[in-house]
C-alpha cells in the first residue's frame, strides 16, 4: 500500500503547488485585479489538501526507505528537508500574508515584494519535488532490491554524464 500512496500523494502535492504558482502568474499577467484577489485568498484553503498530501508523501517515503540508505535516498531526504523548511517558514507565511493583504485590498509594494519571494520559493519547491519524483522513478527501477542495492546501469550512466557535463 505504501508503494501506491507515496507516488500518488507526491504527485498530488506537486500538482497543488504547481497550481498555486501557475494561478498566481496567470492572474497577475493576464487577468483582472478581482481575479488576483480571488486567487490569493483561495490559496490558503488549498492547504487542506496540500498539507496531508505532503505528510503522506513524507511518511510513506520514510517507510519505503526503511533499511535502505543509498546516495539517492539521502539526496531525496535532504531535498525534502529543505522543501519542508522553505514551505513552513517562507511559503505558508507568505500565502497567509498575501491572502490577508488581498482581502483587505492592500495591493501595494509589500504585497508584490512578498509575492516575488513566494514565487521564487515556490519555484524552488516545485523543482525539488520534481527532482525527487524523477529519482523516485529511478529507485522504482531497482525493482525493490534491498541487499546490495544499485540503480539501473542506464540511470547510473546518465547521472555520470550529467556530472561530467557540469564540471
Image (spheres, rainbow, N blue to C red):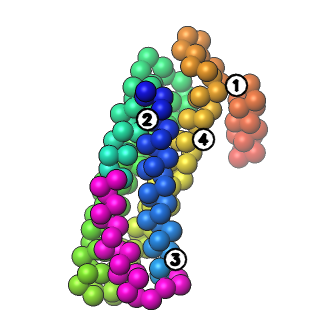
Quarter of the rendering containing residue 118? bottom left
- Reply yes or no: does residue 116 show up in magenta: no
Alpha-carbon span between mark 4 and mark 1: 14 Å
* Dot in front, 1 or 2: 2
In the image, the segment drawn in magenta is 29-49
Where does residue 102 sit, x and y in percent of width and height?
A: 30, 81
Compare marks 1 and 2 and give the one earlier in the sequence.
2
Q: Which residue is located at x 43 percent, y 28 percent?
A: 2
In terms of secondary structure, where does tag 2 sit? helix
**Residue 152 numbered mark, or none:** 1
Label 1 – label 3 distance at C-alpha: 40 Å
Q: Indicate the secondary structure of the residue bearing disc 3.
A: helix
User: Distance of mark 3 from mark 4, alpha carbons?
Assistant: 26 Å
Q: Which mark is residue 137?
A: none
Q: Which label lies toward us, 3 or 4?
A: 3
Q: Position of residue 56 (x, y in %)?
A: 36, 39
Residue at 70 percent across and 29 percent down: it is: 156
**Label for residue 26?**
3
In the picture of the structure, the residue carrying the numbered disc 4 is: 134
Q: Residues within 10 Å of mark 1 (few under 14, many from 20)?
A: some
- Sequence-wise, the earlier of marks 1 and 3 is 3
Q: Secondary structure at mark 4?
A: helix
Amino acid at each position: 500500500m505504501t508503494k501506491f500512496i507515496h507516488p500518488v500523494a507526491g504527485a498530488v502535492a506537486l500538482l497543488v503547488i504547481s497550481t498555486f504558482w501557475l494561478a498566481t502568474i496567470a492572474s497577475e499577467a493576464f487577468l483582472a485585479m478581482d481575479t488576483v484577489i480571488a486567487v490569493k485568498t483561495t490559496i490558503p484553503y488549498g492547504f487542506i489538501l496540500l498539507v496531508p498530501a505532503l505528510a503522506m508523501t513524507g511518511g510513506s517515503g520514510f517507510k519505503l526507505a526503511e533499511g535502505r540508505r543509498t546516495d539517492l535516498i539521502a539526496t531525496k531526504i535532504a531535498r525534502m528537508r529543505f522543501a519542508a523548511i522553505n514551505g513552513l517558514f517562507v511559503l505558508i507565511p507568505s500565502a497567509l500574508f498575501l491572502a490577508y493583504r488581498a482581502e483587505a485590498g492592500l495591493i501595494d509594494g509589500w504585497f508584490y515584494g512578498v509575492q516575488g519571494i513566494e514565487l521564487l520559493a515556490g519555484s524552488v519547491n516545485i523543482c525539488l519535488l520534481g527532482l525527487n519524483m524523477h529519482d523516485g522513478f529511478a529507485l522504482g527501477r531497482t525493482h525493490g532490491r534491498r541487499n546490495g542495492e544499485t540503480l539501473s546501469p542506464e540511470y547510473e550512466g546518465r547521472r555520470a554524464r550529467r556530472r561530467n557535463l557540469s564540471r
